[in-house]
Amino acid sequence: MNVFLQGMGVGAGLIIAIGAQNVFVLTQGIRKQHHWLIAFICSISDMLLIFVGAAGIGSFVAGNHALQTGAAWTGAIFLIWYGSRALLSVSSPQGLEEGKSNGAGMRIIVTTALALTFLNPHVYIDTIILLGSISGQYQARDRCLFALGASTSSFLWFFSLSLGGSLLAPVFRRSVSWKILNGLVCVTMWSIAVQLITMNFYNTNQ
């Protein structure tokens, strides 16, 4: 139980942050467009990556400096780009009603969710590398419990985020709410990118 709870704690610490996945789940919850399906897809995807990391791939990557460096720079570039896109969105007058009128079909929404999950290097850093490396300190059975705990946090977070988004729908009828959200996304993305670059320079000079 202790290992399971440790997995939940570490998983929650890594997952509960505004990122590409979280923003998409939140906005789909606000628009109430297939939001439960999106929460399920993101949760299952995270669980898959977490268990892959716990299986030993995370420890292998953590011990390979070249792979770490490549992952860090790729993740930083992606986050800078995504943050810049969010910053440009601040100037958009879009509110919830406008967003609904431009709602995409289920196939496009599902494809976007998968792309934001598997094309986002930061997801791999969190799930496969970081969680995989931490779980490497446990025996095989405990690694599974740790991964299950982290996966549980992922499920709880994404479904809570989807529910929270649907409850916040009245707030986001005003365009200023979208501006604040996009501004927060930009700051968060750029902050994480700076952390990745700083960490990479620190590890290189070790």
Image (cartoon, grey):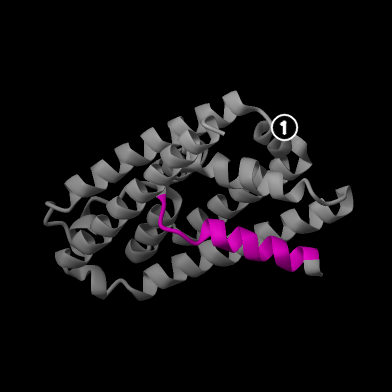
The vertical placement of 183 against 58, above or below, is below
User: Can residue 14 be spotted in the picture?
Assistant: yes
Q: In the rendered structure, does residue 189 fall within the stretch colored magenta?
A: no
Question: Where residue 118 appears, x then y in whole percent?
Answer: 52, 37
* Residue at (53% x, 57% y) in the render: 15
The residue shown at (23%, 50%) is: 102
As drawn, is 100 to the left or to the right of 4? left
- Quarter holding the C terminus is top right
Q: Nearer the viewer, residue 190 or 29?
A: 190
Q: Which residues are magenta?
A: 3-19
Answer yes or no: is residue 119 visible: no
Q: Main secondary structure of the magenta part?
A: helix
Q: List x then y, in percent, for residue 55.
A: 78, 41
How many badges with numbers are in the image? 1
Q: Amino acid at mark 1?
A: Phe
User: To which residue does mark 1 refer?
Assistant: 60
Relative to residue 59, is residue 92 drawn left or right?
left
Q: Position of residue 123 (x, y in %)?
A: 53, 44
Quadrant hosting residue 179 = bottom left
